[in-house]
Image (cartoon, rainbow, N blue to C red):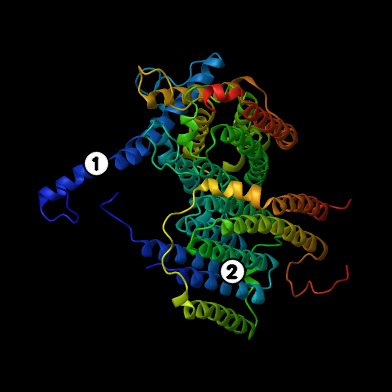
Amino acid sequence: MVVFPPTTPQEVIALILYIITSHTFITIIIFPGFIHLTLVVMFLTWYERKLLARIQLRIGPLYAGGPGGILQPIADGVKLIFKEIMIPYKADKPLFLAMPLMLVLFAALPFAVIPFGQHWVIANLDVGLVFLFAMTSLFPSMILIFAWASNSKFPFLGGLRSLFQQVAYEIPMWVSALSVVMLAGSLNLTAIVEAQSKIWFIVPAFLSFIVFFIAIMAELERLPFDLPEAEPELVAGWFTESSGAVFMVIFLGLYMKVYLMSSLVTVLFLGGWWGPAFLPQPVWFIIKTLIVATFMIIPRGVYPRLRVDMLIKTGWTRLLIIALANVFLTILLIHSGILSAWGI
Amino acid sequence: MALIDIPPDLTFVALAAVTIIGAILALQARELIYGAVALAISFIGVAGFFVSLDAPYLAMLQIAIYVGAIVVLILFTIMLVRREVGEEAKDRPQSGEGSVGLWLAGLLSLAVSGVAALAGPNMPSTPPSGSLPVSALGPTLATQYPIPLIILALLMSATLIGALVLAKVER
Amino acid sequence: MVTLVSYIIVSAALLGIGVYGLSVKRNAMRILFAIEIIVNAANLNFAAFTRYLNPPQVSGQVIVFYSIAAAAMEAAVGLALILVAFRLNNTIDVRKLNKLKG
């Protein structure tokens, strides 16, 4: 019997065992929480380098132990930890050191609401989707503060461009997710996935899937929306002045965002954890998420970069109009009763 | 976990501390940017209050709009109106002003709290059981208050055009 | 125990801080901070009252919804005004911005 506060050693052991095997602990620490997140993000960095290498007809990381350099992220991490953190002259030290940590915090926090399986969600919020978007809307301000705190021209310009780009593409993202919310009838991410049991939302909301995918690629600053990091122009964009552990934290934060957005696409459009029953539900989720991440990585090796004014104009005008048109289309679809065959 | 229950008093006091200290720092910090960050923290504290008041949708809206948009605008404007580093340090109140302001603020909050505490016995002390679902907000907005919604939309367009016209650089 | 009065006291404290900032500070940005703090205090008040009503109603939340949107718009216009004032007078000290000329 578990007693709190424990007094004898047997009670302490019983308490520890109870905590470790409780569902809350497993979801927060192991899956889909802390450990799984760290492992998948590290795997994603390796995966991206390998995939890009194969697209560009080279091999990629090869020597870092194991087959195909699978321990490369660990080697990168160790190298970056041992590098010196250089803080620029007259930079704002508290903000400079605190902002990368906040970036990772707000990139990892929305994972609490993403359902990896029917019962594998940390916090089944009724406003899960809005929580996710609220956390996403915090990134531009943190990037701007970090860029300003670097006290240097290139990061500041990169930070401003990054801010404009991310703010411009947030709205098509929200509006195209609105179609999905209308189809599912709830903001709860678990309910959205459960509403896709008969048909995945990519079929009735195909246009909004396209808009959402493009908007996400612009939010994550991946090519072809890469201008804030364009080397010929801005050295490395808003994280130019970061080095060593600061860069490692930012790097992890970026890839955590990639994983977050890919899993959001899976939840909203690709049916979450639904799949034939020979694999457990979280495995289907991760497979679908990795497929989405692959489609996010491939354009990086294929397309040229978009100019910043074309970028921002596309976000505010063309994408927004397509997303709004799809909202009306979804209203028509729902009211005409075509989708009632699939329980929507 | 059912074992360790954080008493609601503790969360309330913690949220109140974060909000009020954030607000004080927002006005008193030496640099404007520190003030803006403290203001953002204070807004997140208010969002925590909304969550404790069973309005989670409002809390997320508060974070998305206030911290995600207004604080960005404020940061932007701060960076555009800087003249030199250290200019903001001259914002100390002149003699006599600070104390008048403190007296005014103190008396005002004391008056409001006093009225509330005196009417205490007539005010509900425990919230009614059962809270509204999140889906109650949407239909109410659309059916009972449609005209304010449309006015809000028109007002937003007017604000957008107005801000654009104001901030335009005359060539 | 957390009662309605405790929320009102927090809201009143925020109001006091906002009024202090509004009346004492010279920097126009700090005055804008103070205005946002006051609006937040009012929103908190509305949300607290609507929770403690019996039976629970959603109209307070609707008011807070509008208030947040209106405050966003007012902040945007206010910041545009501060920008223009800075461009014309090269200062945002409100003591020096007290002439309507120019």
Q: Are marks 2 and 1 on the same chain?
A: no
What residue does disc 2 label?
B27
Which residue is more in the foreground, A77 or B22? B22
What residue does disc 1 label?
A20
Is B124 drawn above or below residue A188 in the view shown? below
Q: Tell me the SS state at disc 1.
A: helix
Residue A223 x, y percent position in the rendering: 62, 28
Is A59 drawn above or below residue B123 in the view shown? above
Quarter location, residue A108: top left
Q: Residue furthest top?
A: A57
Mark 2–mark 1 Cα distance, whole angstroms, equals 45 Å
Residue A157 x, y percent position in the rendering: 67, 44
Looking at the rendered image, the disc whose residue lies closer to the viewer, 2 or 1, is 1
What amino acid does circle 1 point to?
Ile
What amino acid does circle 2 point to?
Leu
Residue A203 x, y percent position in the rendering: 58, 21
Question: Can the viewer see residue A221?
Answer: no
Horizontally, is A120 left or right of A171 in the view? left
Q: How many marks?
A: 2
Question: Can the viewer see residue B142?
Answer: yes
